[in-house]
């Protein structure tokens, strides 16, 4: 350790300790009250191993002993998730001892309920994988989708986080969905409600807001925003339906924005690339941007007309 | 373990085992048939260490013993890649014993061929790094580009995955390119064909489809889609040329979409930001969006005219 | 090891060694001259642990012993950062022995100065977290923001990297900011200057260029580019102010691009979604795209008019 640094260390420590006291918003000294982000990520990977057996984690699974493998994973997930859920529930009541007994029971009820949902979650994910396979000409194989499609990764974590959100677990669902966001560029709020056979292709830049409703067999491309439209209310708007509704069999192409809590996109509607829309659309309609005129300079200076495009497969 | 959970564990295990049988799409019980994603990521990092010596992995490389270092890395890559390639080849023939002998030979031929391509791959990557340095005013140094540019990371993995794609290796190329996608937001399908001196700046949101052709010295900014345009055929379109062709020296600015298998962007063309195009463009042309009119409210309520912009450097 | 591979190994090694000599751009054999990316990422996480005590790393921090915890982290950061800064400074002078003594002093001065800035950095980050809480109706709690908001992660790393940039440290700031970029899709150059209470919502696809100036209480959504606009100069433009200035209290909605070094966005201006602008805007103005007309086909074939939208909360 150098002399310069050594002579200043006491001062640096004191300044930082003062900063902790003056700006408590960025410091937490309540032991056992905050969840642990790394543990939550471990839980995500254990659930993924349980949901897609043979793909992630242990791969050499003889069919005969599969029950032991399932039991072992369930016990691990139960233990780790109980610890984290307990922490966030205690955190939400401010560690008041009067609530502690209740919280242990509540934690147990939540975690057991969550584990009981996992077979249903597998069933829905199977429809999502099937939708990806049917919708993407570049998909050569369903294993390729399970292993590598970012849409499936993000939707899988969303479905997991959504179950915890429905069980009113604070903090953990958001930590889960932001983990998916960081690895895929797909930002699905755990509060959104999404039907089966959901397909997100490419995915980078997709944003699906907290109060969005999405039907079955909906297909979305990269860069799509399902967002809010409103005067600016910040925290006052917490809980208000402010994101759109997409009915069954809707397709939304890349870069489109659909905004507003009262905007309903009807069944089988196709929304074209880069459409920016804040009004409802009737069933069966196809919406496209009236061609923005292109100007071309060089060997062929001219305005450059293109036909309206209503169908894409990217 | 709590009483509630314990009393339900048998049921939870049985439900999950039933789910595995009913929804086999998301379960795999064939030992040794699936690749291992983590091993494939290790291979990527070993190849990167071999291709950029001194940058990643071991950094203290005396020139005199460099051959030992190269040999050691080649042996490691050979072993790990042979294991993974063997798995996916067996997987693709359904583990039929009649094919097993062939597969060992095929694996060996593929891996040796791949390793033999690595010096060529270094050569092409050197042109990509040079192109990044020449094209980006913010680049202070070529080491900065090797260490930190997401475009170089994604292009490097693409070039690796493309070699395996050319050798008809299933699954692994896609796992590689989705790994790059998750860390960079740049989604290049391993099937695309891309010339030398390729530069992607910033990169988040770039999508380059499976049948895209890109010439030499092409430069692309963030948010660019090189996509398909077609009636919706899903799996029927597998293998059909459905993404565009960009000839030499093309520049495509941020947010532009170029769509369609018959769309050819001529030499030295510049495509402006947010252009959405599905028609061919002759050599040397510059294409821009005819200014979408802006409306401005407040102290200066007025329509807000801007000049057409044909050149950017972001 | 198979016979085929064994018989070719010598040749593969020789070819690679030749490639190292012929393409030195992608090889580095100067021991101790290059920084180590993994060590720099460790430093980021240690600084984050110090700045947000109780959130990341050690979580069970009794208030009474906090000084020991701070001291221990400062000593670790000092040691690791001194090593990396020393390397890049030696690298920048080409390892000339004449400079070595100076470099040790310079390293010590830089690292001690950087550590002295950390309380100030905490203070500014507290304003950023407060801005996120006030601006986002979906935020339920400040802990949620610290734990999981990608904007806070990217801004935190930007503020750290910017301090090193101001101290003229080469390479390391860029490695830091590209690490944030890879995990968030938010690309903030360490050279940008950004005021307090800065909020980036969602964030994927945001690009903030090297010479951007941003005032206080500015709010930016995903897909926003603050970029350059110029004739193409490549390296010649290094250092020139080529990115825009945003004054206090500006809001920029998703997908907008603001370009050019002379473009000044006035106080309290709102820039609408997908606006593409390269001219200055006076204080208090609201700018929106004149509605691109939508064409709708199907049960209600018609042009589809929407009202101009000047306010969003996504």
Image (tube, coloured by chain):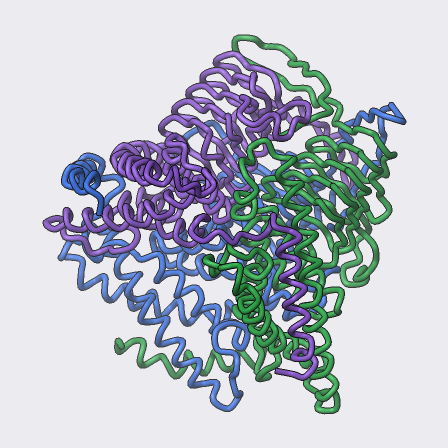
Chain colours: A blue, B green, C purple
Q: Residue furthest left?
A: C64
Q: Is residue A266 left or right of residue C38?
A: right
Task: Confirm whether residue A128 shows in the render.
Answer: no
Give the residue at the far top of this rendering. B300
Q: How many numbered circles are shown?
A: 0
| Picture coordinates of residue C200, whole percent (x, y) | 45, 35
In the picture, residue B257 is in which quadrant?
A: top right
Query: Which residue is drawn at the image coordinates 54% and 77% (left, top)?
Result: A54
In this picture, residue B20 sits left or right of residue B225: left
- Between B310 and C4, which is closer to the camera in this rendering? C4
Query: Which corner quadrant of the image does residue B13 belong to?
Result: bottom left
Q: Report whether residue B166 is seen.
A: yes
Quarter of the N terminus of chain C within the rendering: bottom right
Residue occupying image coordinates x 59% and y 31%: B137
Q: Is residue C232 above or below residue B130?
A: above
Expressed as whole percent of the image width and height from the top left, the position of residue A13 reads 17, 41
The picture places residue A22, in percent across and down from the top left corner, at 19, 34
User: Is the residue A185 above or below the residue A103 in the image?
Assistant: above
Instruction: Give the percent coordinates (x, y) of residue B129.
Output: 63, 45
Along the viewing direction, whichever of A221 and B7 lies nearer the viewer: A221
Residues C281 and A187: in front is C281
Residue B230 to residue C286: above or below:
below
Q: Which residue sits furthest front?
A: C98
Give the residue drawn at x 51%, y 30%.
C210
Q: Which one is nearer the viewer's eye here, C296 or C69?
A: C69
């Amino acid at each position: 350790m150098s002399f310069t640094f050594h002579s200043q260390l006491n001062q640096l420590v004191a300044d930082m300790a003062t900063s902790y006291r003056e700006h408590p918003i960025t410091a937490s000294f309540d032991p056992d009250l905050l969840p642990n982000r790394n543990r939550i990520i471990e839980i995500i990977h254990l659930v993924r191993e349980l949901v897609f057996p043979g793909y992630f984690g242990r791969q050499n699974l003889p069919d005969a002993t599969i029950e032991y493998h399932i039991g072992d994973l369930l016990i691990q997930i139960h233990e780790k998730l109980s610890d984290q859920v307990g922490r966030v529930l205690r955190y939400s009541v401010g560690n008041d001892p009067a609530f502690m007994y209740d919280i242990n029971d509540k934690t147990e009820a939540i975690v057991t309920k969550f584990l009981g949902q996992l077979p249903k979650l597998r069933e829905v994910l199977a429809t999502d994988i099937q939708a990806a396979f049917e919708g993407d000409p570049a998909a050569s194989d369903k294993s390729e989708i399970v292993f590598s499609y970012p849409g499936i990764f993000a939707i899988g974590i969303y479905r997991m986080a959504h179950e915890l959100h429905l069980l009113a677990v604070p903090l953990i669902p958001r930590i889960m969905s932001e983990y998916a966001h960081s690895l895929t560029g797909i930002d699905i709020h755990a509060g959104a409600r999404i039907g089966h056979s959901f397909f997100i292709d490419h995915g980078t830049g997709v944003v699906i807001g907290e109060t969005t409703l999405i039907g079955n067999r909906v297909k979305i491309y990269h860069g799509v925003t399902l967002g809010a439209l409103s005067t600016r209310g910040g925290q006052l708007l917490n809980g208000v339906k402010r994101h759109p509704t997409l009915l069954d069999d809707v397709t939304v192409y890349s870069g489109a924005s659909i905004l507003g809590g009262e905007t309903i996109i009807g069944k089988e509607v196709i929304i074209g690339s880069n459409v920016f829309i804040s009004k409802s659309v009737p069933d069966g309609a196809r919406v496209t941007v009236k061609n923005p005129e292109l100007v071309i300079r060089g060997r062929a200076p001219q305005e450059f007309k293109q036909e309206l495009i209503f169908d894409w497969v990217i």
